[in-house]
Every structure is written in structure tokens, then in C-alpha cells.
Amino acid sequence: MTGLISRLIFLGPPGAGKGTQAMRLANIYQIPHISTGELLRTAVQEQTPLGKKAQKYMEQGDLVPDDLMLDLVLHRLEDDDVAKGWILDGFPRTVSQASFLDHLLAEIHQKCNCVVNLEVPDETLVGRMLGRGRKDDNEQTIRHRLEVYHHETAPVIDYYRERNQLVSVNGNLPIDEVTNVLKNMLHP
Ligand code: AMP
């Protein structure tokens, strides 16, 4: 991969396919896939201090408080393997997280090249998440996560649009087609 687009942020509602597409692109371009949801699930599994604090929020479909999230991302972006690029999936999820990330990237002299917004209608999302079978994927929690998304995370889309960093992609297509659209967009 050239240095042109090697730092990506994936935005989109829960169930939009961020994780799947981020993982595929990370494999293709050989850069780390940083999923805050995955990092948190591992922390919960291992019952680390962070995991113990995050667990109840995740089970209820609420956002884990910013102070815990910022620390997590700060440390992950300090690892050596992120020097050549990264794909952030699930972060930022609030405007304050987005602003924190901007400052952090400026400090470590890195620049996000592109923010991809995967668009999928709500009715499709609920069906997809119910089929996924994750612990926080029961219907009540899913509906709550969608509400939290529209309330807290959707404003992050405007944040990046205003900064001319946003590219919207139709996520309501077969998985391979979405991957192809993304690959062509990043490396035409
Ligand atoms: P995900 O795998 O991205 O759907 O994340 C699963 C859960 O982890 C979310 O429902 C939140 O409870 C928590 N989480 C993940 N990323 C964040 C974040 N950036 N800010 C707050 N909570 C998060």
C-alpha cells in the first residue's frame, strides 16, 4: 500500500459491516485493524480492570465512558505496529472522542486519510445483528444501541463532513461488493 491512504476510520451504525470490511481491508493492505469493541470484549473476557468497568455498559448497549476509551486508544496508537497505518473501527463514537483523536494524531504527527461512513437502513441492521449471535445482540439491546448511535454517534458524521474528510459508501450491498467499492475508492 502506498502512503497515500493508510489511516482510515470506519463509521456507521452497529451492524453496518464495519468490522467485516475493516478486517478485510486490513488483511489486504497489511495494516492493523483496531476495533475498540474487540479490545473491550477481550478486556471483559480477561476481567482486566478496564474489562470489569466496561462490562455493564456493553451488556446494556450503552457507550463505555470516554475516560476509559481515550486511555485505551491512546495506548493502542502508541504501539509500534501502527506506524505504517491503521484502520479504526468503532472509534470515535462521540464528538468528544473525535476531537480527542484529532489532538492525539496531531501530537504523534499522523493524519487520518479518510473517514468511511457505511450507510445501512435501520431495519436491515436489526436483522443482521440478530443473526450475529453476540452476547449484546438481543433485540432490546440492539434497539438501544441504535438509539445511542443516532443520538451520540451520528453527529460524528457531520464532524468529519465539515472537515471534508468524509466519504459515504452504501453498506446495504453484498459483502464482496462493498469490499470492492472500498478497494476501488482507496486504490483506484
Ligand atoms: P462494537 O463491537 O464496535 O459494536 O462495540 C461493542 C460495544 O463496545 C459498544 O456497544 C459499546 O458498549 C462499546 N464500545 C466500543 N467502542 C466504543 C467507543 N468508541 N466508545 C464507547 N463505547 C464503545
Image (cartoon, rainbow, N blue to C red):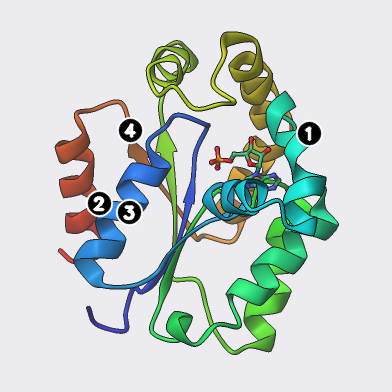
Q: Nearer the viewer, mark 4 or mark 1?
A: 1
> Badge 2: how crowded within 10 Å, few (<14), some, or many (20+)?
some
At x 43%, y 71%, the residue is: 86
User: Residue 4: in sight, yes or no?
Assistant: yes
Q: Quadrant of the C terminus?
A: bottom left
Label 3 element class = helix
Q: What is the three-letter code of the residue carrying label 2?
A: Leu
Check the image and report above or below for 170 versus 125. Answer: below
Mark earlier in primary sequence (4, 1): 1
Q: CA distance from mark 4 to mark 1?
A: 30 Å
- First in sequence: mark 1 or mark 3? 3
Which residue is label 3 attached to? 23
Spot occupied by residue 77 in the image (x, y as percentages of width and height)? 58, 76
> Can you tell which mark lies on residue 156?
none
What is the distance, in whole Å, between disc 2 and disc 4 at their CAs? 10 Å
In this view, 28 is above or below 152: below
Q: Amino acid at mark 3?
A: Met
Task: Write down the residue under mark 2.
Answer: 182
- Specify whether 122 is left or right of 131: right
Question: Disc 1 residue type?
Answer: Lys
Give the secondary structure at mark 4.
Answer: loop
